[in-house]
Image: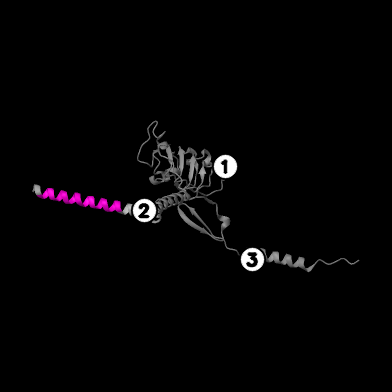
Amino acid sequence: LASASPPAASSELENAFISFLNSYKEITMEVMEVLKGEELQYTRTLSFVKNLDLSCNRLFGSIPEELTNLSGLIGLNLSYNYLTGRIPEKIGEMRSLESLDLSNNNLSGTIPSSMSAIPFLSYLNLSCNMLYGKIPTGPQLQTLDDPSIYADNLGLCGKPLPNKCTSDQGQHQGQEREPKEEEDPREKVLFYLVVALGFGTGFWGVVGTLLLKKQWRYALFRRVEDLTDYCYIRVVVMINRMRQEL
């Protein structure tokens, strides 16, 4: 028996798959990231992206210690979240880090001294947290002399901040600031819905009753007229008395 030749459909499928791979190379992807406080756009150079930007989310909990194992990371942005706890002590092991933004969270504790060992760190923002204690010193951190990168941390002291450190300054000052409360938009919608339902129920409870009950409506109008007449008489009597006294 002669061997059957492979169906033509198989070769057509193979050609279609190869054509798809070739066209896939032409796909352009765009990624917007924030590195060193600036927005960067990547299109065809995604292989060069070594920046982790998780800012402006609803992340909560502590920063995982395992994150410090990303030794090749150049930029790390976790700002504008609800992170708590301490900055990982091993953050100094991220030797390639050039940009670190942990601002606008609820981080507490002291700044790890290992941070001063990051050799290429040129952008740092730890503002708006609950950090306290002395700011670590080191060759690289001393080049970051902008006080605003440590702003709104009531317990921090030392350069570049104007307040000097004492023996036990800042041990508990950072804990005085209350954590930010997450505002759920659904709670706001529910609040307005309850107010609207309450107003509608009360309004139509009164107006609807008056529309349906003719006797109650007449009684209300009669009461209003009596009250108006009473107020009018009182005002007239008071004016006459004042004229007589004058």
Q: Secondary structure at mark 2?
A: helix
In the image, what residue occupies the spot 29% across and 52% down?
Answer: 224
Q: From the image, give the main secondary structure of the stretch colored magenta.
A: helix
* Label 2 Cα crowd, 10 Å radius (few <14 / some 14-19 / many 20+): few
Dot 1 corresponds to which residue?
66
Q: What's the magenta region?
A: 222-243
The N terminus lies in quadrant: bottom right
| Residue 30 in which image quadrant | bottom right
Marks 1 and 2, the one that precedes in the sequence: 1
What x and y, as percent, mark residue 84?
A: 48, 41
The residue that mark 3 highlights is 23
Q: Position of residue 51 (x, y in %)?
A: 53, 51
- Dot 3 amino acid type: Ser
Name the kind of residue labelled 1 in the image: Glu
Q: Nearer the viewer, residue 177 or 166?
A: 177
In the rendered structure, which amino acid carries the disc numbered 2?
A: Gln
Magenta stretch contains residue 102: no
Local packing at callout 1 (Cα closer than 10 Å; few below 14, some 14-19, many 20+) is few
First-in-chain label (1 vs 3): 3
Residue found farthest to the front: 215
- The answer to whether the residue labelled 1 contacts the one labelled 3, judged by CB atoms less than 8 Å apart, is no
What label sits on residue 215 in the rendered view? 2
**For residue 46, which quarter of the picture?**
bottom right
